[in-house]
Amino acid sequence: FGSSFFLWSAMAHSHPVGGLDALNVDIDAWLEWEERKEGVPFRHHAAAGASAGVMEHLFMYPVDTLKTRVQAWKGSGSATTTVREAAIEVMAEGGYRGFFRGIPAVVAGCVPAHIALFTTFEFGKLHVINEDSPYHVWQSGSVGVCAQLAHDGILTPCDVVKQRLQLGTYPTVRSCVAELWKADGLRPFYRSFGATLVMNLPFGAAFVATNEKLKSAMGLGSASRTTEQAKAELPRYFLAAGFAGAVSSALTQPLDVVKTRLQTQDCACGVPLACEKTGTAPVVKYENISSSVRLILREEGAAGFMKGLLPRVVTVAPSAAVCWGTYETVKTFLGLSAL
């Protein structure tokens, strides 16, 4: 609903004279967005989005595990974990399999989340983005925000479970979900949702705007392209998305640290509810975004917000390349097979 509202608003603002009335919109035709000019039906976008999501998370999951370990709070007085130390910890706890802890949770969530992401993106691309408009960058950014919102609403609870397993706090997805639900119902699964949106909505806006600009500069996706041209330009989709991912991840790095602290604060030392305690009741150290920012700044300085920057960029750039490149590749071949 939120994504639809923002897209509707963006459409109205992209046609400021007379708003939507000036469009003479045929509502039935507008909702039948499968019949877009490229002739790509919804099921192809869904299949391409699901494939892209699985490939993205599988490809860089071990590096994401290291990033989570570096960013997570370790308890008062604990030294900062380096990437090398994190890798040694993972190997000591479970060998190479430790790098893939929590992957069932993220795979289960990433399929519907990426279907929502890419179908929202394609819907917005068709109805909002106008490459000839002076507001093209802002239109692309608004579509990116809506697509990211649809994605995060589904994936955030799965990401919470994934990060707790990456830290070795729980042995299985089932035990993690059961313990969190028993402790505080639905709240722990969405405690970081605000921080996730504050981070990912600007990320989505920056990513889509940069990616669309690069695709346009590279001449990708022309309606007049031949089958051979469509196949030949596929590697450039990977390049554009990778660069856009690197830029966007670096810009939103401080917020990723805040999100990780909110999601994993009770996992210090790999023991559930091992945060600072008063008597037997656990004390939530990071209550919300603002308190987390103040605490990190006071205890760790500005450098605290840069923890995990290298593994984040190393994770996001190729992940974005694989995700969006896979999406365009699968969509292209499904489209060609339907001809």
Image: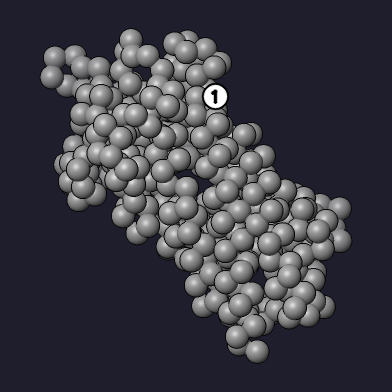
Write down the quadrant of residue 200 in the picture: top right
Which colour assignment does the render follow? one colour
Q: Residue 177 at what x, y percent from top left? A: 23, 47
In which quadrant will I find the C terminus?
bottom right
Q: Is residue 21 visible?
A: no
Residue 325: where, in percent of width, then height?
61, 61
Q: Going by the picture, which residue comes out furthest to the left? A: 280
Q: Position of residue 42 (x, y in %)?
A: 55, 76
Q: 101 and 275: which one is in front?
A: 101
Front-most of 95 and 219? Answer: 95
Q: Is residue 301 visible?
A: yes
In-front residue for pair 84/174: 84
In the image, what residue occupies the spot 77% across and 53% down?
214
Decide if residue 186 is on the left or right side of residue 64. Answer: left
Report helix, strand or loop for mark 1: helix
Residue at 25% over, 24% down: 269
Residue designated by label 1: 306
Report the label total.
Answer: 1
Look at 24% across and 34% down and name the residue there: 93
Which amino acid is tagged 1?
Met
| Circle 1 crowding by C-alpha within 10 Å: few under 14, some 14–19, many from 20 | some
